[in-house]
Image (spheres, helix red, strand yellow):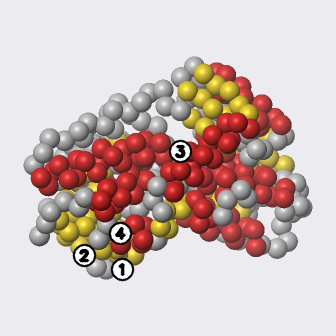
Amino acid sequence: MRRLLLIGAGHAGAELLRRWAAAPPRDVELTLVSPDTLAAYSGMVPGWLAGDYAWEDCCIDFARLAARAGASLVLDRVVALDTGRREVLLAGGAVLGADAMVLNIGSTVRMPQAPAGSGPWLLPTRPLAALHDAALALASAQGRAQAPELVGVGGGAAGIETLLALRRRLLHSGVAARCTLLTRDAEALRSLNPRARRLAHAALARAAVVVRGGFDVQSIEPAGLLARDGTFQAADLVLWAAGAVAHAWPAASGLDVDPSGFVRVDPTLRSTSHPWLFAVGDCAAFSPSLAKSGVHSVRMGPVLAHNVAAAFAGWELQAYRPRRDQLVLLNTADGRAIASRGRFAAAGRWAMRWKDSIDRGFVERYR
C-alpha cells in the first residue's frame, strides 16, 4: 500500500479530497495533517468580519471531507521535513512517512516585534484562524477607546477588504473608529486596473478612511507605528495584512525555494527539486510568478487532483495554466462590491450579490 500525505487544509486540498471520495486511486492510503478541522474560505472572511456570515458559513469541514474520502485525519501541524526519508515531524512529536506529499499550507505574516505591556491591539490576517481568534477576543474585550485609531497595514485587496469590514463591525457595536490605511507603495491596489483602483479609493473615502502611501512600517510602538523614514501613525488597533511570508520549515528541509522561501514548482505543480512532492496555493512559487490569492489555489485544485492520481498510476500529468485576466470581486463592506477583470471595472450591489453567490457556491461544493 502506497501512502500520500496531504499537509494543510487549503482550497486546492479540498478539491483533492472531494475527487478522491468520488474515485480513490487504487492501493493508496491518504492522510491529512491539519491543526484544525474547519478551514475558512478566504473569499468570505471579510464578510464574516463585517458580520454578514457566521464563521461556520465560511468554513469547509475537513473532518467530514476526509471521512468521505476514506482519509485519516491527524490534528497537528508539521514543523520539519526530512526529504531523504520522506518523513515529516509534527509539533506533537510524531513522525509520519509517505511515498508522496502535497503541501497546501498557505502563507503567514511577519510583523515587527510589539512592545511589552500596553500597546496597539494586533490582528494578523494570516493565517485565517489567527484572525478569527483575534477578532473574537477583540469583540469580547472591555474598556476599549470609544473612538479608537484603527490602522490597516497593507494596500492589497485583503488589506482593504478586512479594514473596511472591521470598521463596519465596530460601527455596528457602537464604536466609531478613525481609520487609516498604510501602504508601503505610493498607491494601494497596484495590481488592479486604474478604474478599479479609483472605485476602491472612492469606497475608502465613503468610509472616511485616510490612505497614507509610502509608509514602510519599521516598528510597533506603545502608541502606534513608526515608519523607516521616522514618520509616525497613532494606533489603538492594527490590522496587519502586509505581504505574504513563507513558513520557514520547507526551506530548511532542502526543498528548492525562491528568495522568499516559497516552494518552487513546475507547471504540473511538482517541486522542482523533489518530484514526489506537490505544492499548491500560497506556499508555492510558480513561474512566472503569481499573486498570493485564493483564486489560484481554487483553480489549482482540479489539476492537483488529476496529477496526484496520475503520478501514482503512471499517467501523463497536466499543466496548470493560470488566467492573467482573472476576475476580482472586492467586498467594500457597504452592501456593494467592486468587480474587476482585465481593463474592465464596475461596482454596485449587483456585484456583491454575484460575489456572495460564487462564494456560497464554492463552500457548498464541499458540504
Circle 4 sits on which residue?
68
**Residue drawn at x 77%, y 31% as measured from the top left:** 202
- What whole-number distance in Å separates the C-alpha atoms at marks 1 and 3? 29 Å
Between label 2 and label 4, give the one nearer the viewer: 4
Q: Residue type at mark 3: give it.
A: Gly
Image x and y of residue 267, in percent:
26, 37
Circle 2 sits on which residue?
95
- What whole-number distance in Å separates the C-alpha atoms at marks 1 and 4? 26 Å
Disc 2 + disc 3, Cβ < 8 Å: no
Circle 3 sits on which residue?
243
| Mark 2 neighbour class, 10 Å CA radius: few under 14, some 14 to 19, many 20 or more | some
Q: Residue type at mark 4: give it.
A: Arg
**Residue drawn at x 60%, y 29% as measured from the top left:** 340
Disc 2 + disc 4, Cβ < 8 Å: no
Between label 3 and label 4, give the one nearer the viewer: 4
- What whole-number distance in Å separates the C-alpha atoms at marks 3 and 4? 35 Å
Q: Earlier in the sequence, mark 2 or mark 3?
A: 2
Circle 1 sits on which residue?
92
